[in-house]
């Protein structure tokens, strides 16, 4: 943790020393954006080790007030999302002074805001579990250590939120973005001899044109790896349980990829037909609904006439069914809304270029 903090501080010093957009000029709002991004990284550096300690160490977890769902599910989501966002943010800071500074500042602030929002969401659920008296009889010294860490994270979240508001981009600015994170990734990989041959404009163009395929593939691969590790570690033998976890994790990762990309512009996507956009939005909504059903299944199962939380078929049917229902409802609503609107010119103004 101390090494991570040192790395963040050192990176921020280098960015201040080199900040510019390639011609010696500082990007618009560069100082405010850099301060917000640095605060977001600092929050992530504190949040992640504390979350891992509370969820992965058995003795600490036994004394944690938020060891059960829905609290644990939300913390687990943030535990995955925060380090992923922090990692890509830290890598992008290495090309902070490259051309495209205004776009880079706005997008990186948004990514830092997303990471901070995940940490804030987890902190909110942790406070709810603590103040709600969850596992009061199991509390010991570890509980108060976690509480102190939670208080520190909460203060950092509040301070980071203030800086993010100061460094936020103007409303509607994403429509004019001409640089994305993928272009910056080419700059980084182009400096590594082993990876240099992969840093080709053609590869970036393919990823931009097939972003949805890339998101789905990454989500399935990550979900398969985590499911396999869990199945081996817990000695699962139920095929339905394994399949359900694979579906749930894939849905979680896919929703994270698409939503975060929409927010922070990791990959600039070409214009898509309305039918394609409706289909993608419906799938993402279904993925989010599936995760919400898993998180709050303790209250959802009695509502559908089941009292068993250990019945895999019932839990799988209810949670996946909730996701399918939400996706179907979203598709119907968006389709009807599109038919009610008058036709308009769908030409896209502006564009993007490789950074």
Image (cartoon, helix red, strand yellow):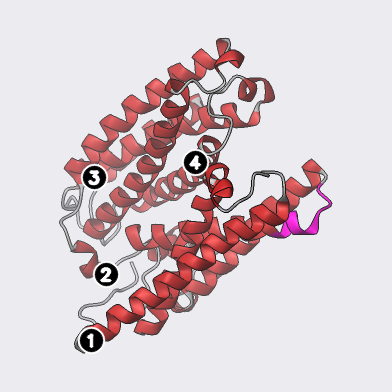
Residue beneath disc 2 = 178
Using a 10 Å C-alpha cutoff, classify the residue at mark 3 as few (fewer than 14 neighbours), some (14 to 19) or many (20 or more).
Answer: many
Residue beneath disc 4 = 74
Q: Write the residue at 20% across / 80% down.
A: 349
Spatial distance from mark 1 to mark 4, Cα to Cα? 40 Å
- In the picture, the quarter occupied by the C terminus is bottom left
* Residue 241 is a magenta residue: yes
Asked whether the residues under the numbered discs 2 and 4 touch, taking CB atoms below 8 Å apart as contact, a structural biologist would say: no
Using a 10 Å C-alpha cutoff, classify the residue at mark 1 as few (fewer than 14 neighbours), some (14 to 19) or many (20 or more).
Answer: few
Spatial distance from mark 2 to mark 3, Cα to Cα? 18 Å
Asked whether the residues under the numbered discs 1 and 4 touch, taking CB atoms below 8 Å apart as contact, a structural biologist would say: no
Across and down, in percent, residue 340 comes to 24, 83
Using a 10 Å C-alpha cutoff, classify the residue at mark 4 as few (fewer than 14 neighbours), some (14 to 19) or many (20 or more).
Answer: many
Using a 10 Å C-alpha cutoff, classify the residue at mark 2 as few (fewer than 14 neighbours), some (14 to 19) or many (20 or more).
Answer: some
Spatial distance from mark 1 to mark 2, Cα to Cα? 17 Å
The range drawn in magenta is 236-243
Upstream in sequence: badge 1 or badge 3: 3
Residue beneath disc 1 = 347
Q: Nearer the viewer, mark 1 or mark 4?
A: 4
Upstream in sequence: badge 1 or badge 2: 2
Q: 62 or 55: which is nearer to us?
A: 62
Q: Write the residue at 35% across / 80% down.
A: 335
Residue beneath disc 3 = 33
- Is label 4 in a helix, a strand or a loop? helix
In the rendered image, the residue lying farthest to the top is: 141
Across and down, in percent, residue 33 comes to 23, 45
Q: Write the residue at 55% across / 68% down.
A: 216
């Amino acid at each position: 943790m101390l090494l991570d903090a040192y790395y963040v501080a050192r990176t921020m010093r280098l960015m201040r020393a080199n900040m510019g957009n390639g011609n010696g000029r500082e990007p618009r709002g560069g100082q405010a954006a850099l301060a917000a991004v640095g605060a977001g990284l600092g929050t992530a550096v504190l949040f992640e080790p504390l979350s891992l300690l509370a969820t992965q160490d058995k003795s600490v977890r036994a004394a944690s007030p938020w060891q059960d769902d829905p609290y644990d599910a939300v913390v687990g989501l943030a535990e995955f999302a925060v380090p992923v966002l922090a990692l890509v943010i830290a890598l992008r800071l290495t090309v902070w002074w490259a051309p495209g500074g205004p776009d880079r500042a706005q997008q990186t602030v948004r990514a830092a805001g997303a990471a901070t929002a995940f940490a804030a969401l987890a902190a909110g659920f942790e406070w709810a579990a603590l103040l709600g008296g969850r596992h009061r009889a199991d509390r010991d010294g570890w509980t108060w250590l976690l509480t102190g860490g939670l208080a520190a994270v909460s203060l950092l979240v509040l301070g980071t939120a203030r800086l993010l508001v100061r460094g936020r981009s103007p409303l509607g600015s994403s429509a004019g973005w001409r640089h994305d994170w993928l272009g910056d990734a080419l700059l980084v990989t182009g400096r590594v001899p082993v990876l240099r041959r992969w840093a080709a404009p053609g590869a970036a163009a393919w990823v931009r044109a097939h972003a949805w395929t890339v998101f789905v593939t990454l989500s399935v691969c990550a979900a398969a790896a985590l499911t396999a590790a869990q199945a081996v570690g817990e000695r699962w033998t139920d095929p339905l349980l394994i399949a359900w976890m694979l579906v749930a994790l894939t849905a979680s990762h896919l929703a994270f990829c698409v939503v975060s990309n929409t927010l922070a512009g990791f990959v600039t996507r070409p214009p898509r037909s309305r039918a394609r956009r409706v289909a993608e939005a419906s799938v993402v909504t279904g993925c989010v609904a599936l995760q919400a059903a898993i998180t709050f299944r303790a209250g959802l199962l009695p509502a559908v006439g089941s009292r068993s939380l250990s019945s895999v078929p019932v839990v799988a049917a209810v949670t996946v069914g909730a996701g399918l229902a939400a996706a179907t409802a979203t598709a119907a609503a968006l389709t009807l809304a599109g038919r009610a609107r008058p036709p308009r010119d769908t030409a896209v103004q502006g564009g993007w270029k490789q950074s």
